[in-house]
Amino acid sequence: MENLIKNNDITYVLKNIWLETIPSYANKIFYSLGFLSMICFFMLLISGIILAFFGPDWWLRTPTGVFIRSIHLWSAQAFIVFIILHILIVFLTGGYRPPRQFVWVLGSLMFFLALVEAEFGYVLRDDFSSQWRSLQGADLYNGSGLGRFINNLNYAQIYGIHIILIPILILGILFFHYALVKLRGIAKPYKEDFQYRMVKANHTILFARGLILVCVIIFLAIIFPSPLIEPVTISQVAIDDPSLMAKTLINEIDHNSDTATYLDNIDPYNFDTKQVYIEKPYIQYLAIQQNTLNMLNYFNSENTQLQSKNLKTASDYFDKDGKLDILPNFKNPVIPLISSLIRMAQSGLYESSLRSQTNSGYNPTYTLRFLSDTGVLEDQADKLKITTEQYGMLHEEKGVLPPGAWWLAPLGFMDNTILQNDDNQDRDGAEVLGTLILLFIAFPYIPFLNQLPDKIGLYKFIWKDNKLK
């Protein structure tokens, strides 16, 4: 009796959760796409919780970690694909028509959040992809004005947004989205002369499709694991190219680097590059190397004209000779100053110094901006073909598979066409993209435009019932 009651309770709950009677065409794969995207989302939640629990060293270095990271990657790709396909079917069949306009709005918001969530995921991978994509995303946010609230280089902030804020928002929207579908039912043909049958929903085939999807994602994770290119480090730059390191440091002293001259419509990098990249690390260097004369004090005591001359002379010295010389040089204190910082960078202490200056050890803003100033990140991205110049970050580090952030292709297209010679490319690109997103969300309410599916006419194929003559 107790088991019977439990079974009846379960049946009652399920009947109130899923749809029981639907139009016959709703048993087709076209109407399983929303369910399949939900399966992907829950796979992302499960794999994401595991990744967050064990941390970057585990997901980058261990076979099990790489496998879970690969499941997370392929689930993200499938999540976006199925949302796009689901929205396409809703569009072609007029499923956004009254009284279901708000269902479209919620689905569009979920799609937008999924894209943002995917990009934040790339930022948190802790490899070269995270370095490059965080910088590119930061430029877009800064150009749109969002950089005042979101620092895409602050992994600690993005971590909280990625694993807490956006998943909660998506879960909330998903609940209300499905609740409206449950309340309104599957959208029926809006053509009065179109015949259809009401049938029992085939939940068995629905869950079978979900199981197949899970198996496919696991298979892809095994065959095409998530790639890894080691992150670029300042110590690596200092060892491989001391002259480049010296030139960058001199530009930071002279406030002439890309970071120091960042000219977007807002300036989130308003820190003093000389203070961050020269003075504070050098003070730490002197604390380690006791009884060493402070060349920075000698430089600061010089007049502006002499400082400019010594910076130029030091730049020429490192370009031609490149030999590190930490011996006191009262004629040109810049040479021993820069040499000391390069030695510090080669040992790995310089990057540690930059990270210690932030409020969080997981905030590599200063490190990433310095690496960006050297130009090595852009060179690496060009080699790997993951820049928006290739019309979206379509490639991954080991080739075409797994796919990269192909959803950025519209941005790459704009950057290389209508905005190619635009001095405010980031800002204007963000404004164009924002306008398109708003139009997309408001589509059901826009006269004439919302009649487009009638002109296309593919709804006849989707609604077709072979049992009806």
Image (cartoon, grey):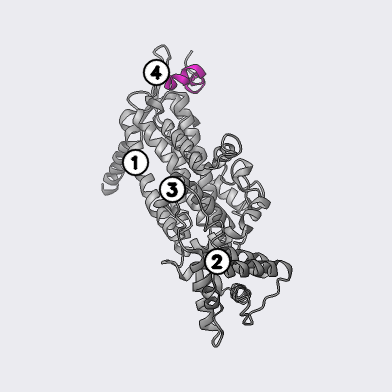
Disc 3, SS: helix
The residue that label 1 is drawn on is 175
Q: Position of residue 209 (x, y in %)?
A: 50, 38
The residue that label 4 is drawn on is 190
352 w.r.t. 117: above or below: below
How far apart marks 3 and 2 lie (CA) works out to 49 Å
Residue range (magenta): 448-466
Q: Nearer the viewer, residue 5 or 276?
A: 276
Mark sitting earlier along the chain (1/4):
1
- Toward the right, the furthest residue is 320
Which numbered disc, 1 or 2, marks the residue closer to the eye? 2
Q: Amino acid at mark 4?
A: Tyr
Q: Nearer the viewer, residue 456 or 244?
A: 244
Image point (34%, 31%), residue name: 102
The residue that label 3 is drawn on is 42
Mark sitting earlier along the chain (1/2):
1
Q: Amino acid at mark 2?
A: Ile
Please say whether residue 346 is visible from this viewpoint.
yes
Q: Amino acid at mark 1?
A: Phe
Q: Amino acid at mark 3?
A: Phe
Please rate how many residues cluster around mark 1, counting C-alpha atoms within 10 Å: few if below 14, some from 14 to 19, many from 20. few
Q: Are marks 3 and 1 in contact (CB under 8 Å)?
A: no
